[in-house]
């Protein structure tokens, strides 16, 4: 019993100059616990003294603090790990075996981390699609990144409230489709079909009016976002104003409304357009198929 108490006594472990492997292991565990407690206390005090502006600022602050504590802790732990040189061959042998087994994935994850943070990568807040799964990036770690999954239904693309974790080397093995949070707009199409009738001209005029209604589509905000994006990216979106295409089909006349919409507002945008079309077509007496 006394030996167990001596083994768990951190003061005696620090004073000992010739520690066994078990003592070294216990000391490392104590060190990690102390580091976690210091991190929690630092975050709590810092958030109290200087409250974050928003959740994004809080996330970035805590991530930088966490990485800094890990780096400082790792450097501080090296003297403890290698203080007993008699165990150095054992430690190196175990480490070597682990490196041989996991070197491939770890190395690829580190390479993927650099690619993610490169000029052609992505950042927290961007919406991406990888390996058939679409979602908003909520975290980027050294070994993996996390998405808040969104529905694959192109008509809504709303959150499923499920987190999906990917190893960073996924950016090397798979194609990545990125919608930058700084832009946030994608092209969408809304289709309306009416019977053959002389009212097609009135219908086309109404649909153009709906798309030009600033309460439905804020074109000034879209133009501003494109201008801001062009400061950092060479983007050529061409025509950014909405347009109505008309096609004669079997059974009626099809109108396709093409417009830019915020990727997180796609469903609400469709609801606003539907509301306006139903109201205006109802006043004009135009029937929808």
Image (cartoon, helix red, strand yellow):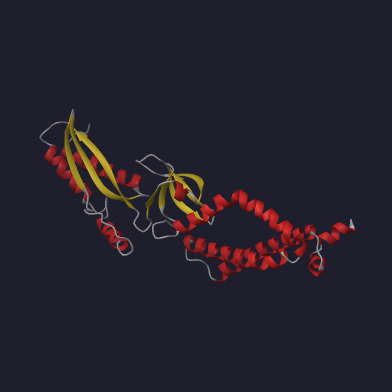
Q: Quadrant of residue 156?
A: top left
View extreme (left): residue: 198
Identified at 88% across, 58% down, the residue is 3
| Number of numbered callouts drawn | 0
Q: Quadrant of the N terminus?
A: bottom right
**Residue 56 in the image, given as x and y percentages of width and height:** 47, 61
Identified at 35% across, 49% down, the residue is 265
**Residue 22 in the image, given as x and y percentages of width and height:** 79, 57
Residue 41 seen in render: no
Please state which of residues 130 and 103 is positioned toward the viewer in this rendering.
103
Q: Is residue 124 left or right of residue 241?
A: right
View extreme (right): residue: 2
Please state which of residues 215 and 173 is positioned toward the viewer in this rendering.
173
**Residue 73 in the image, given as x and y percentages of width and height:** 64, 65
**Residue 37 in the image, given as x and y percentages of width and height:** 67, 63
Please state which of residues 213 and 176 is positioned toward the viewer in this rendering.
176
Q: Quadrant of residue 289?
A: top left
View extreme (bottom): residue: 49
Residue 71 seen in render: yes
Q: Is residue 151 left or right of residue 44?
A: left
Q: Is residue 193 left or right of residue 149?
A: left
Please state which of residues 120 and 8 is positioned toward the viewer in this rendering.
120
């Amino acid at each position: 019993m006394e030996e167990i108490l001596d083994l768990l006594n951190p003061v005696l472990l620090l004073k000992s100059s010739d520690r066994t492997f078990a003592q070294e292991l216990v000391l490392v565990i104590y060190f990690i616990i102390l580091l976690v407690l210091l991190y929690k206390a630092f975050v709590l005090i810092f958030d109290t003294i200087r409250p974050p502006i928003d959740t994004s600022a809080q996330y970035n602050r805590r991530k930088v603090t966490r990485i800094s504590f890990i780096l400082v802790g790792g450097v501080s732990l090296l003297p403890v790990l290698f203080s007993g040189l008699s165990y150095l061959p054992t430690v190196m042998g175990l480490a070597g075996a682990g490196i041989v087994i996991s070197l491939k994935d770890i190395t690829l994850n580190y390479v993927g981390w650099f690619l993610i943070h490169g000029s052609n990568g992505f950042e927290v807040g961007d919406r991406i699609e990888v390996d058939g799964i679409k979602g908003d990036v909520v975290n980027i770690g050294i070994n993996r990144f996390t998405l808040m999954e969104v529905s694959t239904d192109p008509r809504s693309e709303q959150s499923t409230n499920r987190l999906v974790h990917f190893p960073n080397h996924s950016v090397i093995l798979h194609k990545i489709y990125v919608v930058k949070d700084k832009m946030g707009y994608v092209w969408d199409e809304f289709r309306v079909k009416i019977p053959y009738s002389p009212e097609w001209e009135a219908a086309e005029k109404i649909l153009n009016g709906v798309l030009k209604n600033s309460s439905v589509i804020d074109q000034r905000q879209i133009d501003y976002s494109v201008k801001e994006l062009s400061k950092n990216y060479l983007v050529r979106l061409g025509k950014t104003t909405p347009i109505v295409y008309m096609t004669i089909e079997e059974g009626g006349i099809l109108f396709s409304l093409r417009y830019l919409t915020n990727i997180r507002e796609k469903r609400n945008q469709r609801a606003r357009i539907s509301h306006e079309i139903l109201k205006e077509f109802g006043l004009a007496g135009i029937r929808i198929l």
